[in-house]
Amino acid sequence: MNNLRVWTDEQIDYYFMGIKYSDYPRIFWEKILKEIKGCSSLIDIGCGPGAFALKAAQNGMVVQAVDINKKNLDALNNKCREMCLENITIIFGNWLDIEVKNADVCISAYSFGGDIGTIDGIKKILQHTDKIAFFISPYEKIKTDFLSKDLYQKLGKTPPAFSGDYMDLLRIFSEMEQPVKFEVVEHDFGMPLENDNEDTLEKCALYLCEKLELDMGLNLLELMREHLRNITTMKDGMYWVPNPRKSVMITWRRRQSG
């Protein structure tokens, strides 16, 4: 069962700005590169608009990018054309239903709320991994992106929860008797702003209301603008909206036969 939440155009635009300027996915990709020397192919499962698929393709790997959200895949396809990348095959459909070719490397990041995060979904990933697989998931269940914990408290609301955290994944690997290692990684998946004028803050406030799954309203918009004024900082000469996160990267290696 997949609870598909369609991204808005603004969410996709901010996502691409985030992966261009933030720690994500760079900090993870730097760690992954140390583990995949000699690997030439990768599957990004639940790829979204393609943070890891794009990184792998830029490194010359043959990539299959799989997602159930066609809008995200269209955005990835447009980005491939913009970057002149011809080594990404885009595959639309539910992970358990589609066909892919085996790859040296598989990766799935923050995509464990549906079938991917089930025992059947994980089994299929391992079956299609020739060498090594990476699973990046939230450390905590609660979503408080963009330093929003205090904001939810002011509104008297409970933050939404991630579907599928690292403990859920570790339980699946334990049940499958598959040894893994894992590492907690702190990073900032923030985003830049053009400037700090009121129009820009309002546009970003509207985006964050959607992102944080909060009902729109004048009081909320003013609170969100105030929140942005409080947290916006400078980074590399840009106005920056920080989004500190703690994630877990789980690594599985295929056992050598014989």
Image (cartoon, grey):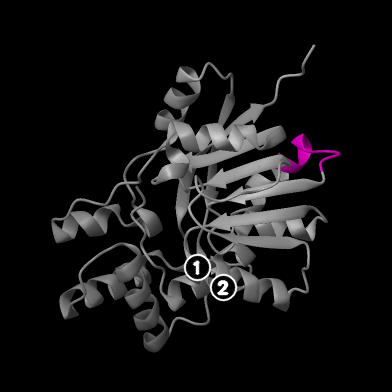
For the C terminus, the quadrant is top right
Along the viewing direction, whichever of 7 and 181 lies nearer the viewer: 7
Q: How many marks?
A: 2
The span picked out in magenta is 32-39
For residue 33: magenta? yes
Tag 2–tag 1 contact (CB < 8 Å): yes
Residue beneath disc 1: 70
Q: Is residue 198 above or below residue 215?
A: below
Which residue appears farthest toward the left when viewing the image?
156
Q: Give x and y (percent) for residue 12.
A: 49, 71
Which mark is on residue 131? none
Q: Is 79 on the left-hand or right-hand side of 191?
A: right
Residue depicted at 39% across the width and 64% down the height: 231
Residue at 30% across / 47% down in the picture?
161
Q: Which mark is residue 74?
A: 2
**Crowd class of label 2 (few under 14; some 14 to 19; many from 20; radius 10 Å):** some
Q: For the residue labelled by badge 1, is the local secondary structure a helix, a strand or a loop?
A: helix
Q: CA distance from mark 2 to mark 1?
A: 6 Å
Residue found 71% across the figure and 20% down from its top: 255
186 part of magenta stretch? no
For residue 181, above or below residue 110: above
Q: Quadrant of residue 201?
A: bottom left
* 42 sits to left or right of 194: right
Q: Dot 1: few (<14), some (14–19), or many (≥20) neighbours within 10 Å?
A: some
**What residue sits 78% from the left and 60% below the top?**
58
Give coordinates of residue 125: x percent, y percent.
59, 37
